[in-house]
């Protein structure tokens, strides 16, 4: 990933320790970031991989995803 990168990133589990670091790095590089959370954290998309509903993700135009 390069600084000034364009595009939109999706971070699965963005409220976890690793997910928070990944989304921070993406933002540092100038990317638009959207995150998911199974906990329903404010500002995130709800996604529980034990019972996934991918419908909300279909609306996003993501160039890269991190799991």
Image: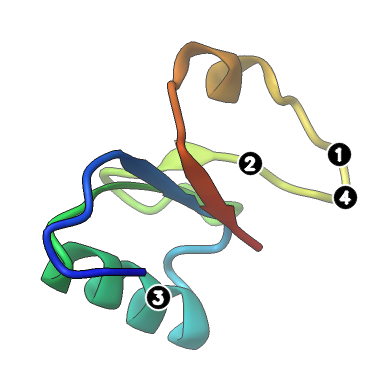
Residue 33 position, x and y percent, is 29, 49
**Which residue in the structure is indicated by mark 2?**
47
Residue 51 position, x and y percent, is 86, 39
Q: Please, what secondary structure does the residue beneath circle 1 have?
A: loop
**Which residue in the structure is indicated by mark 3?**
22
- Residue 7 horizontal side relative to residue 9, left or right: left
**Which residue in the structure is indicated by mark 4?**
50
Residue 61 position, x and y percent, is 43, 22
Q: Are marks 1 and 4 in contact (CB under 8 Å)?
A: yes
**Which residue in the structure is indicated by mark 1?**
51
Mark sitting earlier along the chain (1/3): 3
Q: Nearer the viewer, residue 11 or 41?
A: 11
Q: CA distance from mark 4 to mark 2?
A: 9 Å
Quadrant of the rendered structure where residue 58 is? top right
Q: Residue at x 18, y 64 (%)?
A: 27
Q: CA distance from mark 3 to mark 4?
A: 22 Å
- Seen in the picture, residue 56 relative to 47 is either above or below; the reply is above
- Residue 51 horizontal side relative to residue 26, left or right: right
Q: Residues within 10 Å of mark 1 (few under 14, many from 20)?
A: few
Q: Residue at x 40, y 75 (%)?
A: 22
Q: Please, what secondary structure does the residue beneath circle 3 have?
A: helix
Q: Residue at x 36, y 69 (%)?
A: 1
Q: How is the image coloured?
A: rainbow
Q: CA distance from mark 1 to mark 2?
A: 8 Å
Q: Quadrant of the C terminus?
A: bottom right
Residue 31 position, x and y percent, is 21, 52
């Amino acid at each position: 990933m390069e600084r000034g990168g364009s595009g939109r990133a999706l971070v699965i589990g963005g409220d976890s320790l690793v997910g928070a670091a990944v989304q921070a790095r993406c933002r540092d590089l100038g990317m638009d970031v959207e995150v998911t959370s199974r906990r329903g954290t404010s500002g995130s998309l709800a996604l529980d991989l034990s019972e996934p509903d991918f419908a909300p993700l279909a609306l996003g135009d993501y160039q890269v995803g991190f799991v």
